[in-house]
Image (cartoon, rainbow, N blue to C red):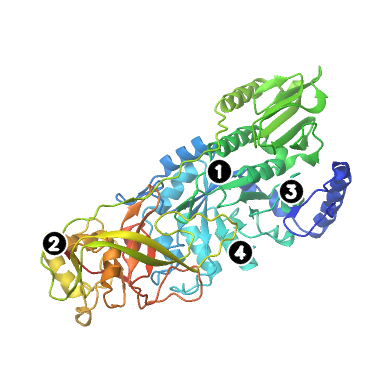
Amino acid sequence: MTRAPLEPGPLIYPPDDPAEWAAWRKSLVEWREKARKEIDLSSYAAPAYSWMRDCAVCGMVMLFDEEFFDAQNGEFRTAAYTSRMQSDFGDLDAVVLWQAYPRIGIDSRNQFDHYRLAPKLKQAIEDLQRGGTRVFMGYNPWDTGTRREPLADAEAIAKVLDEFGFDGVFLDTLPGGSKALRNALDRIKPGVVMESELALAVEDLPLHHASWAQWLDDSVAPAVLRNKWLERRHTMHLVRRWDRDHSGELHLAWMNGTGVLVWENVFGSWVAWTDRDKSTLRSMNAIRAWTANFFTEGEWDPLVSCLIDGVYASAWRLGQAKLWTLVNRNDHPVSGSAFAIGATSSMRLFDLLLGVQLDHAHVEIPARGIGALVALPGSDVESPFWHQLEILKSEHERVNSDNVRTDPLPTLRAKPLSRLRVAATDSIAISAGTRTMVSRFRVRECGEYGSATFSTPYPALHGERRVEHPVDFTACAVETMPVSNGDFLRFVESGYRPANRESFLAHWVDGKPKSEDLDRPVTFVGLDDARAYARWAGKRLPTEYEWQDAAPPQCGVWNWTESEQTDGHTRFSILKGGCVWEAKGSEWYADSGPRSPDWSTKYIHWYPSLDRCETIGFRCATDL
């Protein structure tokens, strides 16, 4: 079946019959010429936006990721993170610093508060920028149920961007930003890039110099990215967040001369890249370091004929030079003559993947890998090029075709024993023995006890998932009532001072609770504060299963439990009990409202200033 030459949507699919490709390319050119007469793309010539033209690798990092942030010392590990990214993927041109979801909604603090309460964030952004990495902030338009800013969102975004020095705004869940936002950003500084998550309409290209290309269903013969075809200086980042095989998006990016999004920590779920795909991207970046101008300034012929079965190519002409980008759709390596061309006395031919000079267009491409050939006038082959060729050759020697990945597993912090062995008067006894516990979670992208393992582009989220565990209980007692402000005051008066006091007891006045709050549950205490109180009292925190088995009465706030786990990237605990506060208006918010004892919420830790909040308190337990 032959597809229509130009279909609506972000991809323009080629005809199935290669004999029709030449006519298809002609129709592409005609459409582009007509569209360019109707759209003003002059902003792409502005020098302030030039940084985005070559932004081939954009990272997506959770601010709470332990690889990126040292919570104990309150410092970002920007150098270690960028070093690892460059080693694994070849480069890091930009990064989105994701701040709020899936934590937001646990209390009234909004998406912008999550940036403001991050320690030394401005310094971290400046460190990234000094290293050559541009930095995006995230904007969540669905955040309407938390604390409201005194400004319209467009002005609030611009204010935060100016305060911290971000270079761009990632538009979560949006196909584009408003003209009001564009104007607000332009008033701050020139060259701020807006990048949409959803497919960007052609008419919005003048306002947005980048966009995601997410979950695109490519054809066997790679399709053309419509917006990239219309404006080659527009950068698109290919992304399939839940995929374990990224070769498809790498192929589509390479055939279209554009970039990819590297996203490993997906909202608390680790989705590792395989060694093979990392190696492919490293090769792409090493080649692109020398050929970037072909993709933004050259003449592009998509899908030119190739002589090797299962291998497809695009051609790019810049002056007298010509570049071919190739992709191997086969699950096995290939070698052979890709084109009926050869080197001449005036034109030299090189394989940029292997880093070698050629007599004819013989290529060797790994399974599901990429290749690149370039034909250069002899006068262009000077010392800098030979040096770059050596770099490409050394990168090829690192090629790893192993389709394997490393998935970190969470480890549970051991439960302590209480010093006291006598239950408090008002407590609920838990008998020893093994019992099957069924916990209920809302299906979210952060997963439950481990990472989410979705296998479809748009998984069914926000429904209920039941997790069943056999649990070995020891005899203990869980207190019926939560620790109150009055109880915690006595602990503070005994001398307790946390090393980090940000947001600590933020609701107290002059170091004491209000008189009307003495008997209410203490809040604005973190997990370590709760543990410290329990130790002081000769007790401990209950595990989530002990809390659930005891089923104490609701007290209006979530409860910390002794359930902390980490996989080296995401540290989390299980909250129990629900709370009176409820974030309304979006299903993307964290769980809120009263909950039954079997309901569990995965709460991702970050930093005391945010972990301590108005909706989380705790109860104590005693071993018997």
User: Can you identify the residue that label 4 sits on?
Assistant: 174
Residue at 53%, 67% in the rendered image: 155
Comparing labels 2 and 4, the label whose residue is closer to the camera? 2
Work out whether 412 lies above or below 542.
Answer: above
Please name the amino acid that badge 4 sits on. Answer: Leu
- Residue 536 shows which numbered tag? 2
Residue 568 at x, y percent in the picture: 37, 47
Spatial separation of the CA atoms under disc 1 and disc 2: 49 Å
Give the crowd class for mark 4: few <14, some 14-19, many >=20 residues within 10 Å. Answer: some
Answer whether labels 3 and 2 touch (C-beta < 8 Å).
no
Work out whether 89 lies above or below 437.
Answer: above
Residue 457 at x, y percent in the picture: 60, 57
Please name the amino acid that badge 3 sits on. Answer: Ser
- Label total for image: 4
User: Can you identify the residue that label 3 sits on?
Assistant: 219
Residue 215, located in which quarter of the rendered image? bottom right
Comparing labels 4 and 3, the label whose residue is closer to the camera? 3
Residue 167 at x, y percent in the picture: 54, 52
Spatial separation of the CA atoms under disc 2 and disc 4: 49 Å
Spatial separation of the CA atoms under disc 1 and disc 4: 23 Å
Give the crowd class for mark 1: few <14, some 14-19, many >=20 residues within 10 Å. Answer: many
User: Can you identify the residue that label 1 sits on?
Assistant: 93
Q: Secondary structure at mark 4?
A: loop
Residue 580 located left or right of residue 547: right
Q: Secondary structure at mark 1?
A: loop
Residue 459, located in which quarter of the rendered image? bottom right
Comparing labels 1 and 2, the label whose residue is closer to the camera? 2
